[in-house]
């Protein structure tokens, strides 16, 4: 189970420090991996603070070239050098505000893999596409054009744009259908099994409902990851959910 905490362009040194103080004494489960994605400028700072805590760190983006005249960008090499193991790619905010395309996301994913970062590739339809019954076709196109030709491990985050930061989440059947479909397309095209995270307005109230959907392998959390108590409540629910299921299977 994977929990990605995307801080976006939020928090500062002081708040990161007090965030980490709570994490010091927390008992993490080896079955639920927490990864924090801080603003790029704080990666080194956070990475030093969490040295003895069993959580990971990742970048919110990486460029599709390894070096060069790309003002303001960050490369996969730099992320790796500063302790990242993961990188979020193709977040809808970057697709919209930074005009990222499926093709550039695919190139970034290839660079990420080359430098031993696991890409978390985001896909998701807008409200109009959902209401017009075009969501499945749209996601299939995103997946086909974004995923690298060769990879050992990638993670997909299904994040309906209309659900991000709105408090609205899809019906359980809609999440189930989309996650199953994403796994099937990738298995067909790449012969690989992938983890699929759900992202969009996840909080401590809805986490159990979301995790109970088949084929949900974790969550990508934005707003609710900014407060340590909310994030740990989500994490704790994920641990409980797994324990309940293991007991049930036994
Ligand atoms: C996101 O930005 O990827 C996200 C899921 O945000 P939120 O949890 O705030 O909807």
Image (spheres, rainbow, N blue to C red):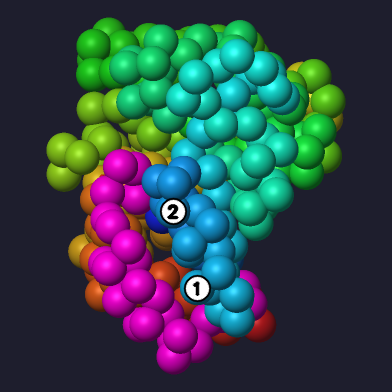
In the displayed structure, does residue 82 sit left or right of residue 98? right
Question: Along the line of sight, which residue is nearer the eye, 133 or 118?
Answer: 118
Which residue is label 2 attached to? 42
Residue 57 appears at what percent x and percent y? Answer: 55, 57
Q: Residue at x 67, y 35 (%)?
A: 76
Which contiguous range is marked in magenta? Answer: 7-32
Identify the image quadrant of residue 235: bottom left
Q: How crowded is mark 2: few (under 14 residues within 10 Å), some or many (20 or more)?
A: some
Q: Mark 1 points at which residue?
A: 49
Compared with 174, 27 (above or below) is: below
Does the magenta-highlighted stretch encompass residue 143?
A: no
Judge whether 122 appears above or below 152 on screen. above
Q: Relative to 105, is 176 on the left or the right? A: left
Task: Indicate whether 123 appears above or below 34.
Answer: above
Residues 28 and 79: in front is: 79
Kindly identify the residue that appears in the image at 66 percent across and 17 percent down.
68
Q: Which residue is drawn at 33% across and 15% down?
A: 96
Q: What element carries label 1?
A: helix
């Amino acid at each position: 189970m994977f929990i990605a905490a995307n801080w976006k362009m939020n928090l500062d040194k002081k708040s990161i420090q007090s965030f980490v103080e709570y994490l010091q004494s927390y008992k993490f489960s080896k079955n639920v991996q927490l990864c924090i994605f801080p603003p790029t400028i704080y990666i080194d700072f956070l990475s030093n603070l969490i040295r003895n805590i069993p959580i990971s760190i990742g970048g919110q983006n990486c460029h599709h070239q390894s070096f060069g005249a790309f003002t303001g960008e960050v490369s996969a090499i730099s992320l790796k050098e500063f302790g990242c193991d993961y990188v979020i790619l193709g977040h809808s905010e970057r697709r919209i505000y930074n005009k990222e395309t499926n093709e550039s996301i695919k190139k970034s994913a290839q660079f990420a893999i080359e430098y031993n970062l696991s890409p978390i590739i985001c896909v998701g339809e807008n409200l109009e596409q959902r209401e017009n019954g075009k969501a499945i076709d749209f996601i299939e196109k995103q997946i086909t054009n974004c995923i690298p030709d060769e990879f050992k491990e990638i993670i997909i985050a299904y994040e309906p744009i209309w659900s991000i930061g709105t408090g609205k989440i899809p019906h359980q059947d809609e999440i189930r259908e989309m996650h199953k479909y994403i796994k099937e397309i990738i298995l067909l095209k790449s012969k690989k099994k992938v983890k699929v995270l759900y992202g969009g307005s996840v909080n401590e109230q809805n986490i159990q409902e979301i995790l109970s959907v088949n084929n949900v392998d974790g969550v990508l959390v934005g707003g609710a990851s900014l407060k340590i108590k909310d994030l740990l409540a989500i994490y704790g629910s994920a641990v409980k959910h797994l324990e309940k299921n293991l007991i049930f299977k036994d």
